[in-house]
Amino acid sequence: MHVRWLGHWQIGVKGTKMGIDSATLLIETEPIPLETDADGVVRVGGTRVTLDTIVAAFREGATAEEIVYQYPSLNLADVYSVIGYYLQQRSHVEAYLRRRQRQRTEVREHNEAQFDPRGIRDRLLARRAGQEAVNDAAAGR
């Protein structure tokens, strides 16, 4: 929910009080700035920043201003809106975050099974040494 103050402040002259000449309080419901991308990842305000990122920063004690400072592509009002959504829909957001964590774990395990990370440094160094030997041979060294 977004509250916007539409009004006119009357500045008093000496001896008179300041007051509101005419004011209207317009209450509008604004959509939560969250979008789900093609991979099912919820992103904030048309940026690449994920809901996961905002919630993690908030849980760690970051203010909305600190989050925007860390991720300048974000809009401050959007971050406040997303934090409010998280606080109001905590159980749904937590369920989404648990699903995302399971997906990350599955992808990591799949990648590690397909590309064994053990010994990768040794394999890369051996590949580099082999390339250097080929280059040295081609250069006649």
Image (cartoon, grey):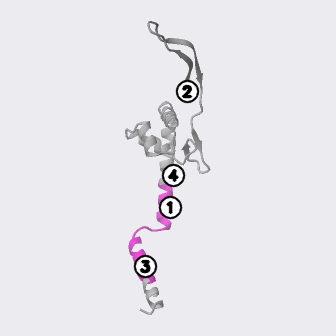
Location of mark 2 (residue): 2
Report the mark closest to the observer, 2 or 3. 2
* 69 is higher (above) or lower (below) than 125: above
- Residue 35: name its quadrant: top right
- Give how far across and how far down residue 8 sits, in percent: 56, 17
- The one of 83 and 22 positioned closer to us in this rendering: 22
| Span highlighted in magenta in the image | 105-131
Mark 2 vs 1, N-terminal side: 2
- Give how far across and how far down residue 23 sits, in percent: 57, 15
Question: Which residue type carries mark 1?
Answer: His
Q: What main secondary structure does the magenta stretch of the protein show?
A: helix
Local packing at callout 3 (Cα closer than 10 Å; few below 14, some 14-19, many 20+) is: few
- In three-dimensional space, the C-alpha distance between marks 4 and 3, rounded to whole angstroms, equals 34 Å
Location of mark 4 (residue): 103
- In three-dimensional space, the C-alpha distance between marks 3 and 1, rounded to whole angstroms, equals 27 Å
Mark 3 vs 1, N-terminal side: 1
Local packing at callout 1 (Cα closer than 10 Å; few below 14, some 14-19, many 20+) is: few
Mark 4 vs 3, N-terminal side: 4
Outermost top residue: 15
Mark 1 vs 4, N-terminal side: 4
- In this rendering, would 137 be left or right of 36? left
Mark 4 vs 2, N-terminal side: 2
Residue found 57% across the figure and 34% down from its top: 32
- Give how far across and how far down residue 112 sits, in percent: 46, 64
Local packing at callout 2 (Cα closer than 10 Å; few below 14, some 14-19, many 20+) is: few
Secondary structure beneath label 4? helix
Location of mark 1 (residue): 110
